[in-house]
Image (cartoon, rainbow, N blue to C red):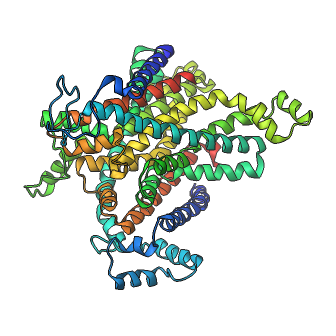
Amino acid sequence: MRNTATVIGAVLVAIVGIGVVCAPLFTSADPLALGPDRLLDPAWDHPFGTDDLGRDTFARVLYGGRVSLVIGLFSAALSVVLGMTVGMLAGFFGGALDEGLMRITEAFQIVPKLLVAVVVVAMIGSGLTNEVLVIGLLSWPGTARVIRGRVQVIRHEEFIAAAEMSGALWPRVLVRHVAPNVMSFLLVSASLQVASAIMSESFLSFLGLGDPAHPSWGLLLQQGQLFLDEAWWLTTFPGIALAATILGLNLLGDGLR
Amino acid sequence: MISVVARLLLRRALLAVPLVFAVVALTFFFIRLAPGDPAQILAGDAPTPEFLAQIRAEYGLDQPVWTQFLAFLGKAVTGDFGTSLYTRQPVFTVILERFPATVLMTGTAMVVASIAGILLGVASARRAGSHIDTLISGASLLGYSMPGFWVGQLLVLLFAVSLDWFPATGMEAARATYTGWRHVEDVAWHMVLPVTTLSVFLLTMIARFTRAAMIEALDQDYVLVAEAKGASRNRVLWHHAFRNACVTTITVIGLEFGAVLAGAVVVEIVFGWPGLGRLFYDAIYRRDFPLLTGAFMFSSTVVILVNMVSDIACALLDPRIRR
């Protein structure tokens, strides 16, 4: 059962990944090119129909995935690195440092991160870099807590004592002996973080904070909202791509656990 | 009992108050961080020189940063979030006007999600590994993977546009003014789709965590003892196991409340619900920064308070957490 779920997850991620990365192989349409055929139903020429400016939705979904995935990957990378650093330091040193870092982590967990992201992006301006920074800087607490818990266990293993007794300084112990032992947890965390970052990005874009020059899936859904009662394809297809990606990553993450 | 509650309240308040201060400080920091002159940000895109001067004086923007922060803090904690650039009303008044609609929708969704999530989680745990469990777990993972606003859009496409069973937007019928019971019915009718949409996320979270907590609880010795004493299956399940598992459920509800409120923002946009969410959207769209930061400080405080309440509830239910 668990393996089946993992395989389904891997297949979903692979399909989306191939479609998005090799987008030019699947469509010759330009996602930003305006056309004369407005709000066309899905048909052979336009498998996912066209939008109000005659742009091909299939191409927009494929290329939009690039934006969503890039933002997801980069902000997840940032949050995983941050979470791992905080978690390892807190778990390894314990005491006042642990107490302080955990209070900060809790504060970040309680404050509604999506609303913080909305305010920041609205004020400092949208754009891919800002979105990545904001999502990455707000999403590390989960990873930090998992890693801290694991490090607290490893901390008392003999090989750590052995490394310390042989004169290794704490940075070396952390990097060479502790880090390799939390890698499996990090992999799970990373895949769940990518899913959550893609979700956060779609939230920001849906609120009108996306970058119109780089339309992501969330931005497509925001545009689709305006034509909900005339063009079902504008919301259905980008949403399926988005949900399939997030579901795939969540299944993978659960399976790796 | 009362002294226990009082002590808990004090302990949690000691954690919550600094958090609220942190939120206000963070907001101040964002206003300073934003490119351009803070006075310009608070005064809108094309302010008159007089209004700009007034804002500068009001927030002490010619003073050192620390004085500015204290002025901002003083105003914020007394509920003075400034004036909305668009409506020219005090931001706090605008927020309070919209808040009831959001409370109605979010509160109903939380009740629905809690009941359904707990029932599904318990049903799943009681037959762990069975087909039903697989089905429930799979469905909840799917629900958890769909952005809330997209669920809403799909429900509108299916139940409002295609089938025309429920209204797609608004909180009450636009053309009729109902009173009394008819009005309640009308609002309830408009609530069906948005509440269902908003419930999906929380419901799946509650089902997932309740299932895990129940499986753990059912494995404990006290469950074995209860069964040996001849307690009925349902009594063991609810009286013995769930009473321990529900601490996890309440913790999840508290921790996810921020996400639920954020979800309410987008769901309100999909369904044109006249609450705080629309306010956020309009504030972003019109670059009404006092309204945006005010709505942010207000909703963050609500989230912090809900967390405090859920912490206290957990401590009352589980003496081990009380300390």
Where residue B149 appears, as percent x and y from the top left, is 31, 42
The residue drawn where x is 50% and y is 56% is: B304
Where residue B216 appears, as percent x and y from the top left, is 57, 26
Residue A85 falls in which quadrant of the image? top right
Left or right: B23, with A207 as reference point? right
Where residue A137 appears, as percent x and y from the top left, is 55, 49
The residue drawn where x is 35% and y is 27% is: A24
Instruction: Give the answer, above or below, for where B167 lies relative to A122.
Output: above
Which quadrant of the rendered structure holds the N terminus of chain B?
Answer: bottom right
Asked if residue B313 can be seen in this view, the reply is no
Left or right: A199, with B222 as reference point? left
Left or right: B74, with B151 as reference point? right
Instruction: Give the answer, above or below, for where A201 lies relative to A23.
Output: below
In this view, the residue in front, B224 or A1, is A1
In this view, the residue in front, A203 or B104, is A203
In this view, the residue in front, B53 or B307, is B53
Asked if residue A49 can be seen in this view, the reply is yes
Residue A38 falls in which quadrant of the image? top left
The residue drawn where x is 43% and y is 72% is: B79
